[in-house]
Image (cartoon, helix red, strand yellow):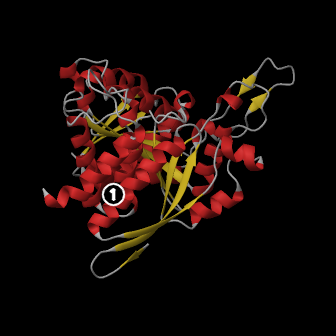
Amino acid sequence: MKLNKDKKMNFKLAVLAGDGIGPEIMAQALKVVQAVCTRFGHEFSCEEALVGACAIDAVGDPYPKETHHTCLNADAVLFGALGSPKYDNNPNAKVRPEQGLLKMRKSLGLYANLRPVSVFEGMEHHSPLKEERVRGADFMCVRELTSGLYFGKPQGRSEDGNTAYDTCIYTREEIERILKLAFELAQSRRKKLTVVDKANVLATSRLWRQVAQEMEPRYADVETEYMFVDNAAMKLIQNPTHFDVLVTENLFGDILTDEASVVSGSLGLLPSASIGVHTSLFEPIHGSYPQAAGKNIANPLAMILSTAMLFEYALDAPEEGRCIREAVQASLEAKVVTEDLAEGTPAYSTSDVGDWVARWIAKKEER
């Protein structure tokens, strides 16, 4: 990324639209990136690449080498969605889209998944939880992404097929890296960190807790608490406003972040970031939603909010990120939403919502 003396950026994006609704929501995200760049005087270029089922269909690999090189050469990666019924419904498929996701995470060193969970004003009633329970909820889940049970060796099944095994492995270096990020995020927010583990049972969790306790004095301004994962799962539903930054290992994080997503009441409003060693990736959490593919009805707001995180975490441009969030809030207040959020008002198409948000950003200077 090039930055001139006037703080104008010239950055390059790798664009991985992926499967299902991915191309449709990605088109809206790029409209918004262009609107932000026009408003703030930045320039950007993008290069598209294949990932997931479409990559398998094209070249037989869910994460081709060409895609990897495109990602490495970019300042950040925008990723749409991955997955297809063609492979989900075929138990004999030897190559699957999800293999590409794991390979991408490992190859790019995407070690930390960040999922902000907040409730937009006026959207509290969409949550299955009581409105008074979710009102004001605003926390960040930090999940370790490239180690633990999903990547542990050995793993497999016995020759007779009656026994299966996976191993969970963590090193001090991996734990310190993710905890450092979590502590620093807490410092930039409300200065509270919850370390989630199962230290009463698991050896890896005991190492997590030991390392966290050793690091805690370096961040004296952060209130640090330790919570078993089962208790954390209950607390997320009972009192989601309790949390500020929550950090945990790969498997626990996979489960807890999906649980936390119900707090907002809509998967279509939840973005995420995967912070990496080589580059960082930004994506919505909702998946490929193949039933809606090609119909121009999918909610693009989570993808658009992922671009806000891109500006904030990859480009160090918080004002640009805040502008995108304000535009999304404005679209919700104006009821310019897709069918999943429309209530007694006409539903807008995917492209209509993208156009409206981009225009709002472009006209914000005039307000």
Residue 128 rendering spot, x and y as whole percentages: 31, 18
Question: Which residue is at 34% across, 80% downward?
Answer: 4
Residue 363 rendering spot, x and y as whole percentages: 21, 57
Task: Report the amino acid beneath label 1.
Answer: Glu
Q: Is residue 113 left or right of residue 222?
A: right
In the image, farthest residue toward the bottom:
5
Dot 1 lies on which element? Answer: helix
In the image, farthest residue toward the left:
367
The residue that label 1 is drawn on is 312
- Figure check: 297 above or below 181: above
Residue 131 rendering spot, x and y as whole percentages: 21, 21
Q: Is residue 45 visible?
A: yes
Q: Quadrant of residue 291?
A: top right
Question: Which residue is at 42% across, 33% downward?
Answer: 257
Question: Which residue is at 74% across, 26% downward?
Answer: 90
Residue 361 rendering spot, x and y as whole percentages: 26, 55
Q: Is residue 213 visible?
A: no
Q: How would you rate the neighbour count of disc 1 (Cα within 10 Å): few for under 14, some for 14-19, many for 20 or more?
A: some
Q: Is residue 94 left or right of residue 265?
A: right
Where does the N terminus fall, quadrant-wise? bottom left
Query: Between 346 and 261, which is closer to the camera in this rendering?
Result: 346
Q: Quadrant of residue 118?
A: top left
Q: Is residue 326 left or right of residue 12?
A: left
Where does the C terminus fall, quadrant-wise? bottom left
Question: Which residue is at 77% across, 20% downward?
Answer: 163
- Figure check: 276 above or below 94: below
Query: Between 230 and 322, which is closer to the camera in this rendering?
Result: 322
